[in-house]
């Protein structure tokens, strides 16, 4: 039996809405609006759809998209665009400078500096404190930057953490009964911490002091004690100058390398087996003319960098240095070097160069106009036929908006 007209209409309603082609006048109006709009044909799309599409554009192409029109520039520079990247869980490695007052400066799009949320006053520590290990208190795991060591204004100690996704700060407690000289390091996606073993008041620490070691358990939100460094491979515990800078650390894939400023040997901790081993440092890599060498890991090599030369040079990072090959377990000699404040990026190695002074941590007499003025970020690439790095001449250096003696360390952080 044939269905009636009312029944057919009921079936169509139950089947769902039908696509109705817009009238010809509406199509012309939409085309005219797209032609006159600063967003072009994107104007006919809802803004959240446009932002979702733009959020997937790599950061290095943001400027090119923003230069298309004033409409795209307004979107790419808006807070709505940053929120869209956060909503899509899109992050990219970003060069971040940590100032001495615990401020954070992020290099956005490879040319602009953006100040991140300031650390709350009650969490702030003195990054120039005598009890901190230079270069061993700031570390990064993914989107989180950790600042450890030092004492807050109320006398307490803790680890301050900045979350780049939310651009906010929170605090972590130190391990139970942890000495005040605490340092932190990220390796294989985990947070590790250590400190020199304390001795009873009035007794002298041994020439080779052991190091206590912990790891942070994200599930239980507690510190887990790990095997301490054996006393037989302990490191020197001495105070010189205006900082306790006896420890130098670096993370290399699944291992943590620790040494003292005298570069006698590496104490290497394997994060998987949780065991220690010793790696001797040759005499050629023990720089007697250095105030404090630094370690930098890149593509299987632990670089033992030197930043001061007996012969005055304007750019101290040109000094030759030694590096330990973690794959073949041999030492290699490298021509040239890198600045002390260096971080790895997705394409380049970025380092801060002091324009008027030593490319190194500055002593008190070197601070001020005499030792540091302006500085800039330079880009470096790994050589194709050797282990060293060269300046990327096609990349223009970027000036930092602060003086060289105003920041403490640099890092590479995954940011929206």
Image: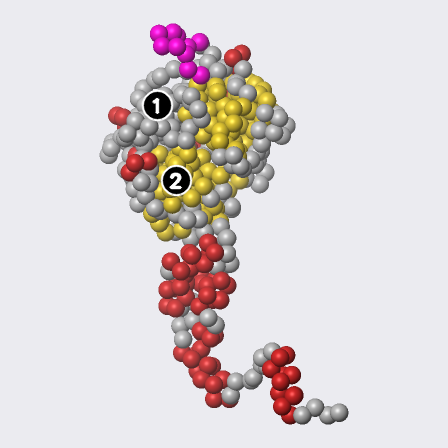
Q: Work out whether residue 131 or residue 134 is closer to the camera in this orientation and state it.
A: 131
Report the magenta residues as a range: 197-206
Q: Which percent across, then down, holds residue 301? A: 55, 31
Residue where numbered disc 1 is placed: 131
Q: Nearer the viewer, residue 412 or 174?
A: 174
Label 2 vs 1, first from the N-terminus: 1
Q: Tell me the quarter of the image containing the N terminus.
A: bottom right
- Residue 229, compared with residue 98, is above or below; it is above
* Residue linked to disc 2: 170
**Looking at this rendering, what residue extends furthest in the right direction?**
1
For residue 172, say whether it is visible. Answer: yes
Within 10 Å of disc 2 (Cα), the crowding (few <14, some 14-19, many 20+) is few
Residue 203 forms part of the magenta stretch: yes
Residue 57 sits above or below residue 382 on the image: below
Can residue 392 be seen in this snapshot? no
Query: Horizontal placement of 128 versus 147: left or right?
Result: left
Residue 133 sits in quarter: top left
In the image as oriented, which residue stretches furthest toward the left?
369
The residue nearer to you, when weighing 234 against 297, is: 234
Tell me residue 44's x, y (percent): 47, 75
Q: Which mark identifies residue 316?
A: none
Q: Is residue 275 left or right of residue 128?
A: right
- Magenta stretch, main secondary structure, is loop
Percent x, y of residue 62: 44, 58
The answer to whether residue 326 is left or right of residue 307 is right
């Amino acid at each position: 039996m044939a269905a009636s007209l009312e029944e057919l209409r009921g079936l169509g309603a139950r089947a769902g809405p039908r696509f109705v082609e817009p009238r010809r006048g509406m199509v012309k109006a939409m085309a005219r609006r797209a032609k006159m709009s600063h967003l072009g044909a994107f104007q006919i799309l809802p803004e959240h759809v446009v932002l979702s599409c733009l959020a997937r554009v790599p950061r290095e192409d943001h400027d090119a998209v923003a230069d298309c029109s004033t409409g795209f520039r307004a979107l790419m520079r808006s807070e709505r665009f940053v929120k869209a990247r956060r909503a899509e869980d899109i992050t990219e490695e970003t060069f971040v400078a940590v100032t001495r007052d615990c401020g954070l400066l992020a290099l956005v799009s490879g040319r602009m500096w953006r100040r991140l949320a300031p650390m709350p006053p009650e969490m702030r520590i003195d990054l120039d404190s005598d009890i901190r290990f230079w270069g061993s208190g700031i570390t990064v795991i993914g989107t989180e930057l950790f600042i450890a060591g030092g004492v807050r204004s109320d006398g307490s100690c803790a680890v301050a953490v900045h979350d780049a996704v939310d651009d906010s700060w929170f605090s972590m407690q130190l391990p139970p009964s942890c000495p005040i000289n605490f340092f932190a390091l990220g390796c294989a996606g985990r947070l590790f911490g250590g400190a020199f073993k304390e001795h009873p008041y009035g007794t002298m620490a041994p020439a080779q002091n052991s190091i206590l070691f912990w790891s942070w358990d994200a599930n239980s939100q507690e510190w887990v004690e790990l095997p301490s460094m054996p006393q037989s491979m302990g490191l020197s515990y001495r105070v010189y100058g205006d900082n306790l800078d006896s420890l130098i650390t670096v993370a290399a894939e699944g291992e943590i390398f620790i040494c003292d400023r005298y570069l006698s040997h590496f104490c290497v901790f394997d994060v998987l087996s949780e065991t220690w081993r010793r790696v001797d440092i040759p005499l050629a890599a023990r720089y007697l003319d250095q105030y404090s060498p630094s370690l930098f890991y890149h593509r299987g090599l632990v670089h033992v960098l030197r930043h001061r030369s007996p012969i005055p040079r304007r750019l101290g990072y040109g000094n030759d240095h030694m590096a330990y090959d973690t794959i073949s377990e041999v030492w290699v000699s490298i021509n040239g070097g890198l600045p002390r404040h260096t971080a790895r990026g997705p394409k380049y190695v970025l380092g801060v160069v002091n324009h008027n002074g030593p490319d190194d941590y500055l002593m008190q007499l070197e601070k001020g106009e005499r030792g540091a003025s302006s500085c800039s970020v330079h880009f470096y690439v790994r050589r194709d036929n050797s282990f060293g790095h060269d300046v990327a001449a096609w990349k223009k250096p970027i000036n930092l908006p602060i003086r060289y003696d105003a920041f403490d360390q640099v890092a590479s952080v995954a940011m929206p």
